[in-house]
Amino acid sequence: MYQRVLLKISGEALAGPKGFGLDPHTLAYIAKELQGIHDLGVQVSVVVGGGNFFRGEVFSEAGGIDRTTADQMGMLGTIMNGLAMQSAIEKLDVPCRVLSAINVTAVCEPFIKRRAERHLEKGRVVIFVAGTGNPYYSTDTAAAQRSLEIGAECLIKATKVDGVYDKDPKKFSDAVKYTTLGYNEATSKRLAIMDQTAFALCREHNLPVIVLDLLEQGSMQRAVKGEPVGTLVEGE
């Protein structure tokens, strides 16, 4: 069993079937899944995206908004998601803290590596928001960076599909799912697991990545127990 993990959850996932904003039922479901991992004695941290509110890259490309400003607006979206998730988790009597890469001390704590580690050691779920605090970097990159900073043993990327396929399973019925992948194989086959900066960080530091279906009940618990679920990407 992994002792310390980081979960990457997209903002779009928090929108549920609505596709925009926050879905209370989805929030409650995710909180319950995180409670299950926490109750195993695993130290749990989360990086949450903000695409359910705002995607800086998309709005910047459409024109009218400077890319840096657009990305900062996206960071604010992740803070809203983190606070909502914190509330849902605490309703289950699980202690939780939100740490932000940008300074918004009126609503959450600033990210400090030692503080994050101390929260985890005390059994608190830690939610990292505002990405890396810098424009042009995705929350995938933030997830990889925070994983390395806090010494997470595994990065679990919870998505809308149950693993990595050789092609889009929603478009091709003959798509083949990988149960395990090496970093080099994933790179040579140009499999879109996460953005290139994030993937390079994971590969360079040999950080295992598990891609799984967020909505498959119990899948995250099985992953932290070391059971086969989704797709495991690691060094050859």
Image: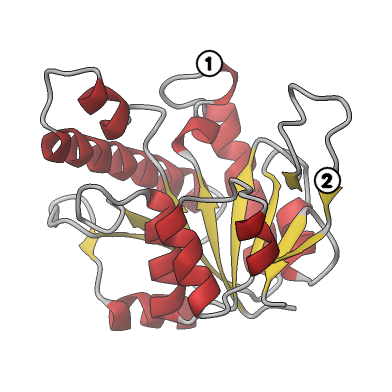
Q: Is residue 27 left or right of residue 171?
A: left
* Position in image of residue 112 (x %, y %): 25, 75
Write down the quadrant of residue 182 in the picture: bottom right
Q: Is residue 68 left or right of residue 8?
A: left
Q: If you read the primary sequence from the N terminus, does the residue marked by circle 1 or circle 2 appear first?
A: 1
Q: Residues within 10 Å of mark 2 (few under 14, many from 20)?
A: some
Amino acid on which disc 1 is placed: Lys
Q: Identify the residue position indicated by label 1 in the image.
A: 18
**Residue at coordinates 85% horizontally, 63% vertically from top-left?**
228
Of the 4 image quadrants, the one containing the C terminus is bottom right
**Residue at coordinates 33% horizontally, 42% vertically from top-left?**
78
Write down the quadrant of residue 105 in the picture: bottom left
Tell me the element at label 2. strand
Tell me the element at label 1. helix
Asked whether the viewer can see residue 73, the reply is: yes
216 vs 143, nearest the viewer? 143
Dot 1 and dot 2 residues touching (CB under 8 Å): no
* Position in image of residue 196 (x %, y %): 45, 55
Amino acid on which disc 2 is placed: Lys
Q: Which mark is residue 177?
A: 2
